[in-house]
């Protein structure tokens, strides 16, 4: 898609009409400024619609990659446009939840369209009592269970890639791919 040199795009601000009265009847000045209007009309149209270009819900599809780079969002060209738009809209929220269960579940849902369940605490423990003995050392591993949402197959490499990107560095995790929801598997 090109927003430059659109044939017949009228200028909302014709330069010839803004010239002093001396040049209003000058044929050369009017033709010269009309040529500038043709060049500047797409620029004015873009600037007039700048808020729409910066809103990922309505921006042209070719601008999504640029917006995604601004907010550090995942931008996979093979994703449908609506999923790419949602990734840009939710990028800041996902960055805020990075390293948490909620962030991991949401990232997997957004990136792969799957459901996920995270169990374990990754080795984090605390005590509510000041001066109390340290709690026993917890396992430093947590489990991520992933199952498809309507699709029959989930790419295990992509799941591991998202999990590695969203998990805290000091934790170890194990990924299980299920064919259906955990409640269905237990039946």
Image: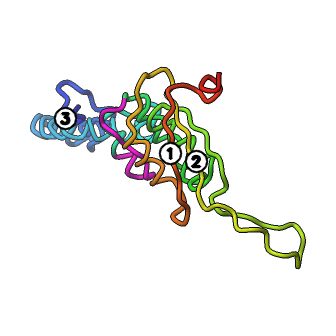
- The residue furthest left is 28
Q: Nearer the viewer, residue 21 or 132?
A: 132
Mark earlier in primary sequence (2, 3): 3
Q: Are marks 1 and 2 in contact (CB under 8 Å)?
A: yes
Which mark is nearer the camera, 2 or 3? 2
Q: Where is residue 23 in the image (x, y as percent from the top left)?
A: 20, 41
Quarter of the image containing the N terminus?
top left
Give the numbered dot on residue 53.
none
Name the residue located 69 percent from the left edge and 63 percent from the top edge: 138
Which residue is under mark 2? 143
Q: What stretch is highlighted in magenta?
A: 66-79
From the viewer's perspective, tell me whether residue 142 is left or right of residue 79. Answer: right
**Quarter holding residue 29:** top left
Please report whichever mark, 1 or 3, sits nearer to the chain's N-terminal start.
3
- Front-lying residue, 110 or 57: 110
The image position of residue 11, as x and y in percent, is 28, 32
Q: Is residue 106 left or right of residue 1?
A: right
Residue pointed to by mark 1: 175
Outermost residue on the front side: it is 187
Q: Distance between the residues labelled 2 and 3?
A: 61 Å
Q: How crowded is mark 1: few (under 14 residues within 10 Å), some or many (20 or more)?
A: some
């Amino acid at each position: 898609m090109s927003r430059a040199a659109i044939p017949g795009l009228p200028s909302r601000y014709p330069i010839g009409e803004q010239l002093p009265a001396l040049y209003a009847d000058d044929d050369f000045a009017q033709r010269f400024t009309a040529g500038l209007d043709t060049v500047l009309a797409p620029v004015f149209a873009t600037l007039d619609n700048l808020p729409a270009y910066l809103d990922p819900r309505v921006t042209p599809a070719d601008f999504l990659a640029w917006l995604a780079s601004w907010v550090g969002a995942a931008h996979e060209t093979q994703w449908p446009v609506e999923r790419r738009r949602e990734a840009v809209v939710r990028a800041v929220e996902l960055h805020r939840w990075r390293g948490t269960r909620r962030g991991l579940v949401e990232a997997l849902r957004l990136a792969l369209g799957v459901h996920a369940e995270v169990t374990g605490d990754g080795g984090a423990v605390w005590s509510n009592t000041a001066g109390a003995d340290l709690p026993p050392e917890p396992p430093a591993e947590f489990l991520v269970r992933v199952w498809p949402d309507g699709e029959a197959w989930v790419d295990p490499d992509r799941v591991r890639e998202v999990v590695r990107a969203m998990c805290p560095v000091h934790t170890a995790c194990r990924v299980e791919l299920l064919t259906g929801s955990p409640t269905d598997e237990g039946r």
